Image (cartoon, rainbow, N blue to C red):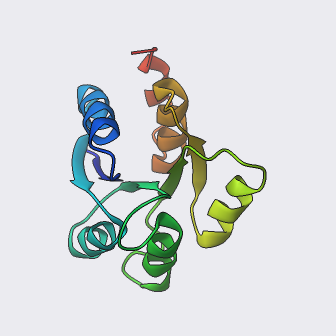
Amino acid sequence: MTRILLVEDNEMNRDMLSRRLERKGYQVDMAVDGRQGVDKAKTLAYDLVLMDMSLPEIDGWEATRELRSDPATKSLPIIALTAHAMSGDREKALEAGCDDYDTKPIELARLLGKMEALLGRAGGAGEAGGS
C-alpha cells in the first residue's frame, strides 16, 4: 500500500483529504505542523508527501528545504498544497524543492493525477472520478 504523509494544520482539510485518499487505497499519516512533518518524514518510510505551505512551527517552504537537505529524504516526492495561488508561487514551491504544486480547494482528480505521475503508477488516476 502506498504510504502518504499529509502535512496540514487545518483539521477540516486534513480530515477531508485523508478520508478521500484512504478511499482511493492510500495509507495516510498526518502531521499538524512543519516540524512534525519533517520529523515524521525522516523517521518513517513514505512514498510521497503532501505539504501545506502555510504551517505553524516551520512553514512548508522551510520544511521542504530541510527534507531536501537530508540524504535520507532528498528524493522523497513532495507536492506543495496552497490556498495562495499567487503569480510565482508555483516557481517558489519548485525552487524550495517541491516536485509539483496544487492549489486549494483540492480538486481530487487533479491531485491524484499529480500523485500518480510522481509515484510512477500510470493508469491509476483514471478511476479517480470526481468524489
| Residue in the foreground of this view, choosing between 118 and 62 | 62
Q: Is residue 106 above or below residue 6?
A: above
- 79 left or right of 42? right
Q: Quadrant of residue 13?
A: top left
- Residue occupying image coordinates x 53% and y 54%: 80
Look at the image and tell me in which quarter the N terminus lies.
top left
- 91 left or right of 51? right
Q: Is residue 129 above or below residue 78?
A: above
- Residue occupying image coordinates x 24% and y 69%: 40
- 42 left or right of 50? left
Instruction: Give percent across and percent down for residue 28.
Output: 24, 45
| Residue in the foreground of this view, choosing between 128 and 50 | 50
- Residue occupying image coordinates x 25% and y 32%: 25
Instruction: Give percent across and percent down for residue 54.
Output: 48, 58
Instruction: Give percent across and percent down for residue 115.
Output: 48, 42
Q: Is residue 76 above or below residue 114?
A: below
Q: Quadrant of residue 66?
A: bottom left
| Residue in the foreground of this view, choosing between 95 and 128 | 95
